[in-house]
Image (cartoon, rainbow, N blue to C red):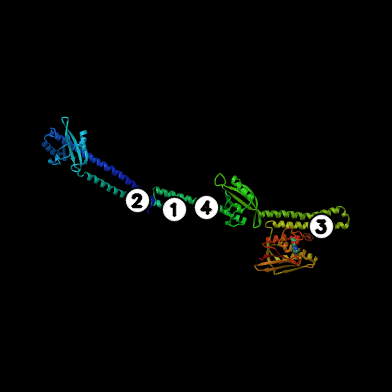
Amino acid sequence: MFSKFRWNFVFSVLLISIIGFVFFDFFLYYSLKDYLYQQTFHEMRLKTHLAVFWLEQKHLQPLPDHLASLNDITFQIRDIVNCRVTILDSSGRVLTDTDVPTERIQFMDNHYNRPEVQDALKNGWGQIYRESDTIRRKLFYTAFLINYQTKKVGFLRLAYYAANFEASIDKILSSLIIANLVGLAILLISSLVLGALVTIPILQIVRTAQKIAAGNLDKKFSVNRKDEIGLLNAILNQLTERMRNQIHEISYERSKLQNIFTNLDIGIIVVDHQKRVLQANPEIYQILEIATNEIKDQNIIDILFSEPLLTDIGQTLTTGNRNKGEMVCLRNENKIFLNYIVIPFTTSESEPTGALIQLHNITELKTLEAIRRDFVANASHELKTPLTAITGYAETLLDGAIDEPSARVKFIRRIREQAQRLEFLIADLLKLSELDRENALDIKPRILNSIIEEVIEDFKDKALQKNIELSLKLAETVKVKIDEEGIRTVFSNLIDNAIKYTPEGGLVTVRMNLIPHNRVRVEVIDTGIGIDRKYHERIFQRFYRVDKARSRSLGGTGLGLAIVKHIIEQHGGKIHIQSELGSGSCFWFELKVR
Ligand code: ADP
């Protein structure tokens, strides 16, 4: 495969070589040519001097005289110098010429204006390489001005026909071109080989780098060389190794953070500077009861509209301060109470680029707080009533009633009644607080039948007083894992209520049946006043009574069913009620048989 680099390399080498060759050839060609010129002229100058010397030796007369002898001498000179010899008189007329027959000499052009003759006239010496007007060939000309007794008498001109000169020059040129082409071919091959030596390992490195960039981080650079490319290979392997370690470290840290973020039991929302949601943890979806896709890229206003929260986010985004507060929002017609902290979120050291909002659902806390408040108020009220009565009776006694025997007994009895009420109330309150403790139950396998029978036995007298029949319908002996004391309290409260709210001559039945799924169902049924459906939920609340006065007069505290519900729930069950006003009640629950 030819890489771009290899092409560029080959192309550059060839381009530089061609430019170099052209300059070199140009220089060599002209230097050589010039050298040959100079050499030829040098030779001709020597020949000319030799010819002049010969002429002066043989012919000392003014030139035009003795033309015949001049003719002879001219041919002698030609034999010596091996050139065309021409002798002109001072006006440029040809006197003799070795290459032109004698009879045609008189028809020859006047040579006065020939460049070599003109040069000789001016400088005593002229030379030129030019085309001959007479024989139409390129010749080397030299001309020498001949003086006789300080008088210009004529010119001696030599012409040399260098037949091979041009051909030699052309041959040199074509040899150079062939040499250049061979050189270029060698350069092309060697640059291709050199290019391959460099590019093949680079291509290997590039291919590995591409695979690594595509995510295959386990790839290794495998060019095994001892030069700079080998060094580059080793450095790249080191870099990849470091990158791999860093990526592992980052993804480990990221998944750690993601885990924390996902499992936090406080809600987190991250918003940008435009209050657009960037990220939220799963707890947020639970708190706000919304789906995952309902939150991303939404403006926080559309998800959580709360004036104080929005103001605090705006302030955090401009000042970079933390802000916290409390807010209420409506979800499915329910009020949700949330605690929030807005923390600035910066990527640089300057202004915050966003905010991280922590949301903590405090609805349960708020509800518990409200329950506690109500409970304290109710308990205080319940405690205050008998105490006020006791104080009143005591004062009446002190005001003189103590001296009347019949009144004294009456008031002391009432004081005892109220004190008993207080005792029951405090006992129930203590029971509740005991149940609120963690691990309040002591769960052990127990025979349920005997517990019920014992409780029934306790209430026999009370039932008898009201002429109420106590009926027990128990199935076979059932063993359950329960807190005995707790279940005993449950039966006591339910049977007590059944007797309390059933008029004289009524019937209270306790039934126990085994039902599918290895469970036992227990029912306390009475033929009493019954409870309107609208109170079925509320009678299990602390201090709630359908008829306050009746309950009080019967010694009720309003805590009995709350205690029952609490204990049954702690056993993993649920207390149920079936009742209509005026047609008796049935309280039932289920337990798992062991
Ligand atoms: P109390 O001490 O007032 O009985 P409870 O919590 O035991 O308090 O019961 C709450 C209320 O539920 C009672 O005040 C009464 O109005 C009603 N209630 C409970 N049991 C019965 C029942 N068997 N028949 C009719 N009403 C009942």
State the SS at label 1.
helix
Of residues 5 and 422, the one nearer the viewer is: 5
Of discs 4 and 3, which sits in the foreground? 4
Whole-percent x, y for residue 160 in the image: 18, 41
Query: Residue 113 falls in which quadrant of the image?
Result: top left
Of residues 373 and 284, the one nearer the viewer is: 284
Mark 3 belongs to which amino acid?
Arg
Q: Are marks 3 and 1 in contact (CB under 8 Å)?
A: no
Q: Distance of mark 4 from mark 2, alpha carbons?
A: 45 Å
Q: Which residue is mark 1?
A: 210
State the SS at label 4.
helix
Of discs 3 and 1, which sits in the foreground? 1
Q: Which residue is mark 2?
A: 192
Disc nearer the start of the sequence (1/4): 1
Mark 2 residue crowding within 10 angstroms, few (<14) / some (14–19) / many (20+): many
Q: Distance of mark 3 from mark 1, alpha carbons?
A: 96 Å
Q: Is residue 260 visible?
A: no
Of residues 141 and 367, the one nearer the viewer is: 141
Where in the image, quadrant-wise, is ligand 1 located? bottom right
Disc nearer the start of the sequence (4/2): 2
Q: Which residue is mark 4?
A: 251
Of discs 4 and 2, which sits in the foreground? 2
Q: Are marks 4 and 2 in contact (CB under 8 Å)?
A: no
Query: Residue 550 falls in which quadrant of the image?
Result: bottom right
Q: Distance of mark 4 from mark 3, alpha carbons?
A: 75 Å
Mark 1 belongs to which amino acid?
Gln
